[in-house]
Image (cartoon, grey):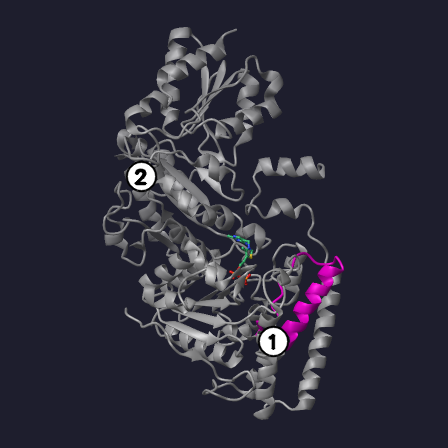
């Protein structure tokens, strides 16, 4: 398999909201749904940070600026699988995850709700490991003769891990129905993208393994959807894996424990501020008359109300029972674990 | 009943699993066409096809990582690591992923994965091929570590491991592959995981071992029994983690003396854990300190000197006698 290095940066809507490429075929309903999750996702992220500041939430990794990730999941069916990290919450929402699930995760509860039925696995914390799992899922789908696909998502830092390379290699060798998506947000905590790899684009990794690579304006949700859709179709048709690099930017801190002013300039942040993924999509939707100003307002109100309900439900969520610490190590807890449980919790 | 080597018994178990459960897939380095470097998977690809038994790229993290994905999706992968020492290259996929996904997901996901790997000294291998790795994985909570001591045990334990809902690291001592033959039923049978076996009952001392050294320990025990007129209970741990504490504790409470034998090095080892359990639960029954016969805390040596350190019968006999002293 020989693929050239990609040269084109896929873009459908430019930062000013002008249509500069062929838009993907999406119904007004689908457009509104994508837009809703981007709007909700930003509010949710900001609320998560606020909750953390109030001591009601654990460490959280904001994704503001990276809302176009919604387009990673919008081309997927429910029976496809999506395996990402703490930075992919919006893509998970689009795939069907309740926003309550990552709220619980980030409060330090067990990660429930990321079910097989939704094709989801808990947000990965160990950088890069999930890429191999996604390939394994894809190989299982292929083995069972389905036309399902598995998408693995990681950051630019993760592309330096061996697991990332092994994942691309396995996927290529077995022609697995797998799509690797890299959210290149320019930093791995404080380490800039240039320190991760000497190649100009991370998408160049694809051709090296015999996989087509795509470079995408990662703040353009329609471009993200369109390219991922194309990769999904190829994978469903048995035409093998792809690698998609989304050029984007994390507007906030790496996590609630990070101070980004230590490693990047205001000018740089301002440069990306002007490329805001939500603003640009909104202009497009208004211009195309898919959304009116009134509908936009209503959608924001809806998202605000949904988020409020979410936070209320979250506050009402009971913490894990202490017994649970011992219940999920093995399906059947071995006697020595039960003894340790009784030692700590007292004999029941 | 046919008399089989451990290689044949494992091969037979794998064949039966492939036959009765379509979710089972076997893969690793050289396991397909070549049938494995020890011929453990010999003929399986021919018989069951490349979909079921296949070679992978040479990448241990990749092998275990994709196996985790397959298991999450619902298959029953049986991944081979060509030599257990090379599982170091996949340690994160075992310890940080396979072993913890049930936990992380609060029981919503599970990873029914078996990792098979040969290990063990006495066969003159290059570096890292012989190393015992069980203690590393015993500490990776959420995975069972199983070490069979012969053909009959290997088959029954492997069936149980493959049908277990949780990950199992199945370590096969290379010296056992062809050195002994046992009667092995042709049909499927299981030996429960996490249950030790009393190989021979006795009253004066409990000798605890597993894998290849079970046989050396047995031979040593019989020699001491014969020459000194004592009776020694010998226990095969079979699953080295989680431990079957009950069997060990019940025995030591009766005999009042214990010796633990393994090939792995000493510090933070399975023997250390067994002795800690004895201290916690049978200390007042003890008539003598519990000793360990193990390899020392050095890297496993290159072949020219390995015989110096792998516990042999004489060393075990000496330790048994010291422990039996009034
Ligand atoms: C294997 C591993 N090493 C280090 C860390 C600590 N860590 C957490 S996030 C992070 C940076 C990840 O960067 P990137 O892959 O670009 O993703 P991003 O956070 O930017 O979305 C690091 C070093 C980790 N979680 N896992």
Residue B18, label in figure? none
Q: Is residue B208 visible?
A: yes
Ligand 1, by image quadrant, is bottom right
Q: Is residue B6 left or right of residue A26?
A: left
- Residue B158: percent from left, percent from top: 39, 42
Residue B61: percent from left, percent from top: 40, 51
Co-location on one chain, circles 1 and 2: no
CA–CA distance between discs 1 and 2?
Answer: 65 Å
Q: In the image, is residue A312 above or below residue B161? A: below
What segment carries the magenta color? Answer: A38-67
Up the image or down, B108 lies above or below A264; here it is above
Looking at the rendered structure, the secondary structure element under dot 1 is helix
B203 lies above or below A92 = above
Task: Let me know if residue B305 is in the magenta part.
Answer: no
Where residue B4 appears, as percent x and y from the top left, is 27, 35
Residue A307 position, x and y percent, is 70, 72
Disc number lying in front (1 or 2)? 1
Q: Which residue is mark 1?
A: A273
Quick one: B211 or A335, which is closer to the camera?
B211
Residue beneath disc 2:
B9
The mark total stands at: 2
Q: Chain of mark 2?
A: B
- Quarter holding the N terminus of chain B? top left
Q: Is residue B73 visible?
A: no
Which residue is at 70% across, 85% downward? A297
- Label 1 lies in what chain? A
């Amino acid at each position: 398999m020989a693929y050239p290095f990609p040269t084109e940066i896929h873009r459908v809507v430019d930062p000013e909201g002008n249509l500069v490429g062929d838009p993907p075929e999406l119904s007004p309903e689908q457009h509104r749904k994508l837009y809703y999750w981007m709007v909700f996702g930003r509010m949710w992220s900001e609320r998560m940070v606020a909750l953390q500041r109030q001591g009601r939430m654990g460490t959280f990794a904001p994704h503001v600026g990276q809302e176009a990730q919604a387009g990673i999941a919008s081309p997927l069916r429910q029976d496809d699988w999506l395996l990402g990290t703490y930075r992919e919450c919006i893509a998970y929402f689009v795939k069907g995850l309740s926003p309550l699930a990552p709220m619980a995760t980030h409060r330090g509860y067990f990660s429930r709700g990321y079910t097989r039925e939704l094709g989801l696995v808990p947000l990965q914390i160990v950088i890069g490991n999930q890429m191999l799992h996604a390939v394994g899922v894809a190989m299982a789908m292929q083995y069972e003769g389905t036309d399902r696909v598995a998408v693995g998502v990681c950051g630019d830092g993760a592309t330096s891990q061996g697991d990332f390379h092994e994942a691309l290699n396995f996927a290529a060798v077995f022609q697995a129905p797998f799509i690797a998506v890299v959210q290149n947000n320019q930093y791995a905590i404080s380490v800039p993208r240039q320190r991760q790899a000497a190649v100009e684009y991370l998408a160049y990794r694809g051709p090296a393994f015999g996989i087509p690579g795509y470079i995408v304006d990662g703040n353009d949700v329609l471009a993200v959807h369109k390219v991922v859709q194309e990769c999904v179709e190829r994978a469903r048709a048995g035409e093998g894996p792809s690698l998609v690099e989304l050029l984007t930017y994390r507007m906030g801190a790496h996590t609630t424990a990070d101070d980004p002013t230590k490693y990047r300039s205001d000018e740089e942040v301002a440069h990306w501020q002007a490329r805001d993924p939500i603003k640009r999509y909104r202009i497009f939707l208004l211009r195309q008359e898919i959304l009116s100003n009134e509908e936009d307002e209503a959608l924001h109100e809806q998202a605000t109300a949904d988020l409020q309900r979410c936070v209320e439900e979250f506050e009402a969520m009971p913490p894990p029972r202490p017994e649970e610490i011992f219940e999920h190590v093995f399906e059947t807890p071995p006697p020595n674990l039960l003894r340790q449980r009784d030692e700590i919790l007292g004999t029941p | 009943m046919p008399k089989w080597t451990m290689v044949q018994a494992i091969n037979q178990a794998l064949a039966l699993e492939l036959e009765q459960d379509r979710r089972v897939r076997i893969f690793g380095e050289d396991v397909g066409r070549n049938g494995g470097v020890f011929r453990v998977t010999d003929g399986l690809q021919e018989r069951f096809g490349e979909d079921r038994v296949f070679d992978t790229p040479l990448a241990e993290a990749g092998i275990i990582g994709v196996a985790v994905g397959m298991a999450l999706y619902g298959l029953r992968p049986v991944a081979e690591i060509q030599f257990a020492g090379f599982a170091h290259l996949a340690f994160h996929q075992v310890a940080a992923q396979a072993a913890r996904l049930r936990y992380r997901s609060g029981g919503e996901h599970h990873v029914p994965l078996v990792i098979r790997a040969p290990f063990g000294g006495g066969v003159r291998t290059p570096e890292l091929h012989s190393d015992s790795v069980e203690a590393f994985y015993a500490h990776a909570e959420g995975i069972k570590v199983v070490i069979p001591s012969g053909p009959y045990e290997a088959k029954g334990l492997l069936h149980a491991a493959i049908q277990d809902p949780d990950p199992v690291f199945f370590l096969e001592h290379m010296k056992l592959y062809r050195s002994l033959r046992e009667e092995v039923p042709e049909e499927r049978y299981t030996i429960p995981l996490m249950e030790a076996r009393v190989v021979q009952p006795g009253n004066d001392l409990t000798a605890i071992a597993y894998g290849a050294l079970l046989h050396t320990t047995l031979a040593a025990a019989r020699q001491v029994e014969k020459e000194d007129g004592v009776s020694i209970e010998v226990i095969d741990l079979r699953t080295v983690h989680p431990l079957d504490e009950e069997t060990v504790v019940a025995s030591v409470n009766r005999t009042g003396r214990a010796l633990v034998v393994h090939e792995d090095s000493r510090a933070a080892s399975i023997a250390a854990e067994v002795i800690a359990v004895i201290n916690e639960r049978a200390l007042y029954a003890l008539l003598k300190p519990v000793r360990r016969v193990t390899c020392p805390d050095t890297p496993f040596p290159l072949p020219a000197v390995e015989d110096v350190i792998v516990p042999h019968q004489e060393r075990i006999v000496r330790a048994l006698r010291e422990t039996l002293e009034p």
